[in-house]
Image (cartoon, rainbow, N blue to C red):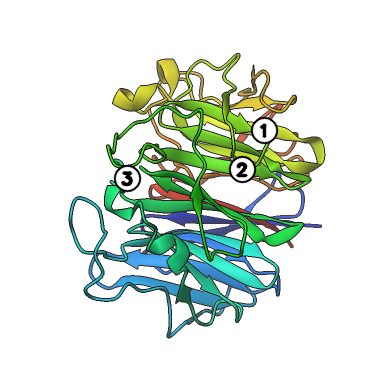
Amino acid sequence: MGTTAVIGTAKGGFILRSDDRRTWSVEGPLFKGWKLTTTSRTPAGTYLAATASDVYGTAVHRSRDLAEWEQVETGPAWPAAAEGGGNGEARKLKQIWTFGHGGNRTYAGVDDAGLFASDDDGVSWTPVDGLNEHSTRSGWFPGAGGLCAHAVLVDPADPKRLWCGISAVGVFRSDDGGASWTPKNEGIPIVIEDKSCKDIGRCVHGMVADPKDANTIYRREHVGVFRTRDGGEHWERIENGLPSWFGFPIVMDVPTNTLFLAPLESDEYRMPVDGRLSVYRSRDGGDSWEDASAGLPAEHAYVGVLRGAMAADQDGGVYLGTTGGQVYVSSDGADSWQTLPVTLPRVLSVEVYPS
């Protein structure tokens, strides 16, 4: 079985293909000149791609083969007069940052923060008003990257149970298919205080759930790395062995329950610690972390790794893209890394599909 990786960048998308995860072909760019913020594959096997332009706005595209794409006519969109865009501004749909799937429904998380749902394989989208018009919305404020709903997790055993992570707001959970939502941030320090609601004001950087136990969720925050074992009711720090708790992506190799993340040096600097690009992994559910960076640049590497720019293929493969356009691949669970012979625009997203 082969592997296909779709790399979304600030100037389009690139498709990397391999039969052995050692020798790769490169295709692209797709959507040349546009931001490709994320891709995903629906339960029906359709590929979705989200693009964005400062001039033309956002769009969702559909494909069956990653070659021929069709833009949908009814993509996610805010009403012209919708309030709640952060800092007292009207809402504007600037980016589509993530897709999530549960049952036959697909969700899109967007900036300005909100959630949209599709029940027809991505052809049309409707707002999830239970979250979008939440009673705390007046206290939602953007982080450095915007007011972003960038993480959507769905319980595989119960598609009506889902979580949404928003920066700089926090995590919300719905137990009724999105009709109502409750903040789930106990144990996470507040970053932006809202006097009217102490349940928000957190800044989610990345999330991943254990699909074998959806109550176990791992969360990267502006102020640390955390875990919940009760669906978000309580969160605890899991930073033992990390050189820095700051950073963005966190991913899981499900068959081995191994977690991977890329640490950066603090909110102030946002670059690898000591100029050493590194990946750390945990084989015990976040209780401890070990360096797994053999083959990555050990010095003079001052690039970032964004939230969506890391992926695991569920067969020991781990993939990493940087803000400098470098792409690295491990085929052995991060025991070793190889550098792919590409220099791309700023990498925004990495998604991997068996082929």
User: Going 66% across and 44% down the picture, which residue do you hit?
Assistant: 209
Amino acid carrying label 1: it is Leu
Dot placed on the residue nearer the N-terminal end, 1 or 2: 2
| Furthest residue in direction front, as rendered | 196
248 relative to 27, above or below: above
2 relative to 205, above or below: below
Q: Helix, strand or loop at disc 2?
A: strand
Q: Which mark is residue 208?
A: 2
Q: Nearer the viewer, mark 1 or mark 2?
A: 2
Q: Helix, strand or loop at disc 1?
A: strand
User: Going 76% across and 48% down the picture, which residue do you hit?
Assistant: 20
| Furthest residue in direction bottom, as rendered | 73
For residue 77, what is the image quadrant? bottom left
User: Going 46% across and 64% down the picture, which residue do you hit?
Assistant: 130
Give the residue pinned by disc 3: 145
Residue 239 rendering spot, x and y as whole percentages: 57, 19
Is residue 312 rendered to the left or right of residue 182? Answer: right
Q: Are marks 1 and 2 in contact (CB under 8 Å)?
A: yes
Given residues 78 and 98, the one toward you in this image is 78
Residue 257 rendering spot, x and y as whole percentages: 76, 35
Give the residue pinned by disc 1: 259
27 relative to 351, above or below: below
Q: Are marks 3 and 1 in contact (CB under 8 Å)?
A: no
User: Going 37% across and 22% down the picture, which residue do you hit?
Assistant: 266
Q: CA distance from mark 2 to mark 3?
A: 20 Å
Residue 152 rendering spot, x and y as whole percentages: 55, 54
Q: Quadrant of the N terminus?
A: bottom right
